[in-house]
Amino acid sequence: MNQELISRNIGARFNLKVEYEESQIQRVIDILESELIGLKPVKSRIREIAALLLVDKLRKNLGLVSSSPGLHMSFTGSPGTGKTTVALRMADILYKLGYSRKGHLITVTRDDLVGQYIGHTAPKTKEVLKKAMGGILFIDEAYYLYKPDNERDYGAEAIEILLQVMENQRDDLVVILAGYKEKMEKFYESNPGLSSRIANHVDFPDYSPEELLQIGKIMLEEQQYVLTPDAEKVFLDYIKIRMQKPLFANARSVRNALDRARMRQANRVFESAGRTLTKADLVTIVPDDIFKSSLFNS
């Protein structure tokens, strides 16, 4: 940039707080706060990315050099830790700041990108990319795209097409690769081209038992159910035991457990149909509705 332009703009003034409020980013972050319990490191990282993008936008407005910050991201963590929800809010932020034309999110897995025979993968992948243009493409369990032990696998072809688009059309598409941390690290080691295009790495920690209890209470509240105080204690015990078992998926496992508790509650209510039922009978989950889980009886 020439010195004259810098001198002309150096006296320009703006109120960062006003710019921030006008962008409505805080509204998106507030929604994120209300939607997700805990995850402080994740929320902090999203704020940092939003701040960088806002400052970059202001620099552009003043004619200052802008390096066009890389927007492709990696979300790592266990299932049920809010990766898709955060991706949705990230899409909102990018749209409000003008870094995304449409602000939509397309979520896919390997099966949506990789074909079963020669000539099938390229059109399949390109069709998904076409739908995602102007927004965010979220690839869950991205490491399944790469199967080095299978010479006849077509995942490598999908990765090549993805790499080209991530580089050549990065102004019109943001790619988020997601999955378990260890598997994602191995995936990046095997695909340095992908790794070099990812500017933002966000790690999603597992929830604590107390956070999962809080999440469960919010889920029930949304469905107009409530746990009795004793049922809360039993459900917390359930969570602590379930966390030690295979295939635990954080909030997803909590939702599944509560769905089964509601079924047991419904069965309990049905069996007492001979008496007059109150509203409290229909909305209350009691300890026995959780105690009857196979987890306590195995």
Image: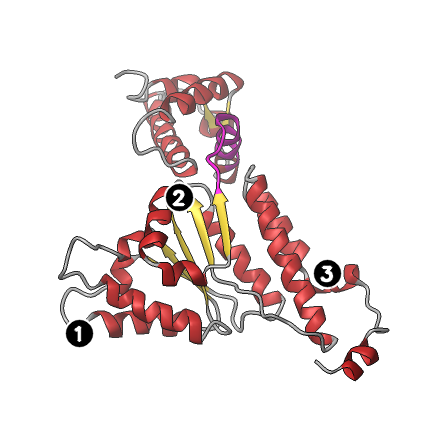
Helix, strand or loop for the magenta stretch, by majority: helix
Residue annotated with mark 3: 20
Left or right: where does residue 78 sit relative to residue 123? right
Give the mark toward the camera: 2 or 3: 2
- Measure the alpha-carbon separation of dots 1 and 3: 47 Å
Q: Identify which residue is drawn at 67% across, 69% down.
A: 57
Q: Nearer the viewer, residue 30 or 149?
A: 149
User: As drawn, which residue projects farthest toward the front?
Assistant: 3
User: As drawn, which residue projects farthest toward the right?
Assistant: 11
On whether residue 184 falls in the magenta region, the answer is: no
Residue annotated with mark 2: 181
Instruction: Check disc 3: other Cα within 10 Å, few if <14, some if 14-19, many if 20+.
Output: some
Q: Secondary structure at mark 3?
A: helix
Q: Position of residue 31 (x, y in %)?
A: 60, 50
On the question of residue 167 being in view, the answer is yes
Q: Identify which residue is drawn at 45% across, 29% down.
A: 282
Residue annotated with mark 1: 119
* Image height of 23 relative to 265, above or below: below
Mark 2 near mark 1, Cβ–Cβ under 8 Å?
no
Task: Give the residues in magenta.
Answer: 204-218
Q: Amino acid at mark 2?
A: Lys
Q: Secondary structure at mark 2?
A: helix
Q: Position of residue 261 (x, y in %)?
A: 37, 28
